[in-house]
Amino acid sequence: MFKFADTRRMTPEKRAAAIDEARRLMQDADRVLIGAGAGLSTAAGIDYGGERFRDNFPAFIKRYGMTDMYSAGFYPFTTEEDRWAYWAHHATVNCLGADATSLYRELYEWARTRDYFVITTNADMQFEKAGFAKDRIFATQGDYAHIQCVTGEHGIRSDAEEFAAIERDTGSGARTRITDAGLVPTCDVCGRPMSMHLRIDGSFVQTEDWYTAEERYRDFISHIPEKPTLLLELGVGWNTPVWIRMPFERIAKVTDSPLIRMNYDSAGIDGSIKNSVSVDGDMAEALPLAIGEKQTEGEASHD
Ligand SMILES: [Zn+2]
């Protein structure tokens, strides 16, 4: 076992050995619980900052001084026309107009022959796009494909058509304000403004589908004691550890299930969990290696 308890980087040797160990666990697994956070999508190329942000949001950067899509999501827009110009573009860039990335596809090709379930805090719907069955995904924080009434009391609705119309109005984000005020989404029930169906504050709507997914997740977990299950945690940091990171450690402890944690940093695992593997650094490289279909150049075979 290779543990890493702090923020220092693993040595290349330890990392290569940990990836080998992860590959062995992944090949042996018939059943897997995948827990995925923002780090997986970042590794898959859905980067919220850097070049991708600068390429897609130049007008917003110029007007607001935004630095990345994560913090932009909390920007206090002063008008609804400004707010929805941003969010329609954000949702289009990251979800509505995006295809499945190759990293998620590779993960699916590995998982599809196994009994799997996914819990994710990611709103980009990459699991679904890559082929994972909708009834085996629990997206705890909502997604970019739905909007809800600000009151949180009047359900949710698909935003695809409304956002497409807004993108046409703004020239796909070339302008930062909607010119046709009629395009601003409002609630069908009470006429109040809408918000994204994302867990940003306490008004997040947990729909019937949300509770159904949660129940399926709990059911999947309940069978871990009699069905050996690999816990595969990918890119889960410390933003919302209560959904995946902490429960996965708890499940590993209680059931002795193997736990693989891949994360760019903070990949360390509680030392009391015996059967665990930490892999830090770039998951775009490490995950395909652990899946086992690709070998890095010059990598020694340990099989
Ligand atoms: Zn309403």
Image (cartoon, rainbow, N blue to C red):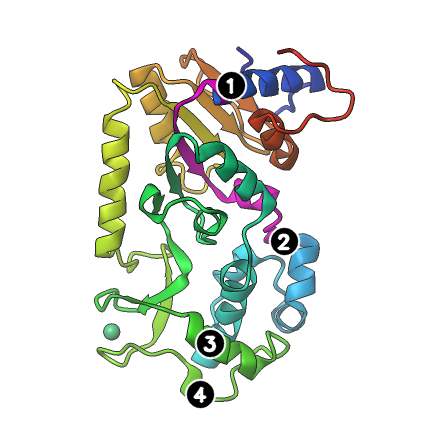
Circle 2: residue type: Gly
The circle on residue 150 is none
Quadrant of residue 184 within the rendered picture: bottom left
* Labels 1, 4: front one: 1
Q: Secondary structure at mark 1?
A: strand
Which of pointers 1 and 2 lies earlier in the amino acid sequence?
A: 2
Alpha carbons under labels 3 and 4: distance apart = 14 Å
Which of pointers 4 and 2 lies earlier in the amino acid sequence?
A: 2
- What x and y, as percent, mark residue 84? 47, 74
The circle on residue 277 is 1
Circle 4: residue type: Ala
**Which of the image's four quarters has the C terminus?**
top right
Q: Which residue is mark 2?
A: 49
Q: Is residue 203 visible?
A: yes
Circle 3: residue type: Thr
Q: Which residue is mark 3?
A: 78
